[in-house]
Image (cartoon, coloured by chain):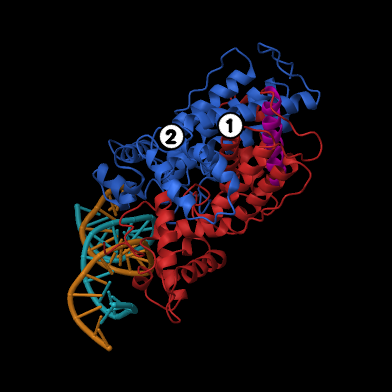
Chain colours: A blue, B red, C cyan, D orange
Amino acid sequence: MTRAALSGNESLEPGSSQWWAERAAAENRRRPRDGGLSTSRIITAAVELLREEGVEALTVRGVAERLHTSSASLYRHIASRDELIALIADHVMGEIRLVRTDRGWRADAEALMHEMRRVMLSQPLPPSVGRNTAGYGPNTLRLVDAALELFLEAGNTPEQAAFTTTTMIQFVAGAADIQRSAVGRGPHGATRSDGFARLLDGLPADRYAALRTAGAVYVAAPADEVFAHGVAIFLEGVAGRLRASGLADEPERGIRPST
Amino acid sequence: MTRAALSGNESLEPGSSQWWAERAAAENRRRPRDGGLSTSRIITAAVELLREEGVEALTVRGVAERLHTSSASLYRHIASRDELIALIADHVMGEIRLVRTDRGWRADAEALMHEMRRVMLSQPLPPSVGRNTAGYGPNTLRLVDAALELFLEAGNTPEQAAFTTTTMIQFVAGAADIQRSAVGRGPHGATRSDGFARLLDGLPADRYAALRTAGAVYVAAPADEVFAHGVAIFLEGVAGRLRASGLADEPERGIRPST
DNA sequence: ACCTGAACACCGTTCAAGT
DNA sequence: ACCTGAACACCGTTCAAGT
């Protein structure tokens, strides 16, 4: 009771669809006070803090300080740190620009994936973001909607479009997440390869044969190139499955099927 | 100096290749004391704690308690909580069974991906695991080696094999990560869909058209099926690119090219 | 030389006491 | 009715004082 900051959402799990639904309702109900605190001011401050001082600085107390209040005051607007993080996650997703290129679904999907990754890497984010605590936030749903639209227009069934959208998000989020937390990369990725040679030396000589063949390029590969390759695999796979299931594939330009 | 638990690895970033190399060297140097503490006992205790009490219970103090010591004592064997997490991550990867099916690279890759996911979902893990803090640990390198081998035998160049391996890991890790943190799923995923209908009602009626078409199946889709679909897309994409680049594709059974 | 109790500098969160 | 100082119950990490 006391814990629910914004109404009677009792103990809904932050990030769940019910939580987002309740939050939207409560936010409409709310009357913006004088010059006081608000959820959006808190989110803005939190994102600034994140950008300027990194993930480790993102504490409830830190956000409060930036707003010249006490942490206790924030708990009138957010019920927990987890809520704050879910809100930040969706907020960041809002920076993803959704544009249609008119060059067919493959070009659109490719652009969308690169744009998602750009935004996810554009600032530090707490570990749980990029997962799906934001999954049902308004901005994230816009993204999901755009992806579903794209894959529907490509000729997929709703189920295929849904599965493909989830797969796309999983891949892009995974790639961004891993790159974000990538460790030991020097300015030119040099540090990484250096230590790697030493590392291989320490391993049993009769194993790790493939690693000795392709390990160098595996370690040194520029993240952008690897991601572009991953996108190509994904698009090729989606197109291949469209052909296999005898559904409409896209010739050269986008033709909207009468769905 | 004082901080480096296991030798002169000074301030290497936990998870970096140098850190793993240094750690392996130091571990060999070390003489196992009487019946005392050891890194592996610490890891075992940490993993037990994780399995029994979940991510939130994984504290240095909690691990110490389980070993009937003080947290200060653990710092003789690990330099920080981050080190502990990197070690746990690689330890868990060690549970991945690497088997060749003799039914060609596609079957092998498919089995490997499902096995990776199984292990990643088999127990709670801290957020940063499944990213690449474990990237250079011995068990993780065995996994990478197996994947590289697979894709090399399929006929890829070392560079293609490397890129494809990274893509595979990113996708599987992303899928597992998102599913792990999936929020609001009831016993039968019911809760999820329930709240979703209410959520859609709250959204502007003139937008989110695709979401209204495919949203239900998007939300309710069983994670296993979605993952299987994602694997199919990935394999199809890899095969497609192999054909496109004129490199050897796999007919029906595995034929080792003379790489 | 090794170990660790006790302390330090933080956290997220709560709530009684203020206005 | 709203706000918040101060406290609670934790953290990770350190180090002086013990053995």
Answer few, some or many: residues within 10 Å of disc 1's Cα (few below 14, many 20 plus, some between 14 and 19).
many
User: Where B1 falls versus A48 (above or below)?
Assistant: below
Looking at the image, which is closer to me, A55 or B214?
A55
Q: Which residue is mark 2?
A: A121
Q: Quadrant of the C terminus of chain B?
A: top right
Marker disc for residue A230? 1
Q: Which residues are magenta?
A: B224-244
What amino acid type is highlighted by mark number 1? Gly
What amino acid type is highlighted by mark number 2? Leu
Q: Give the number of the mark in front: 2 or 1.
A: 1
Give the mark nearest the N terminus, 2 or 1: 2
Looking at the image, which is closer to me, B18 or A71?
B18
Q: Quadrant of the N terminus of chain B?
A: bottom left
Q: CA distance from mark 2 to mark 1?
A: 17 Å
- The chain under label 1 reads A
Query: Which residue is painted at 51% across and 29% down in the image?
Result: A225
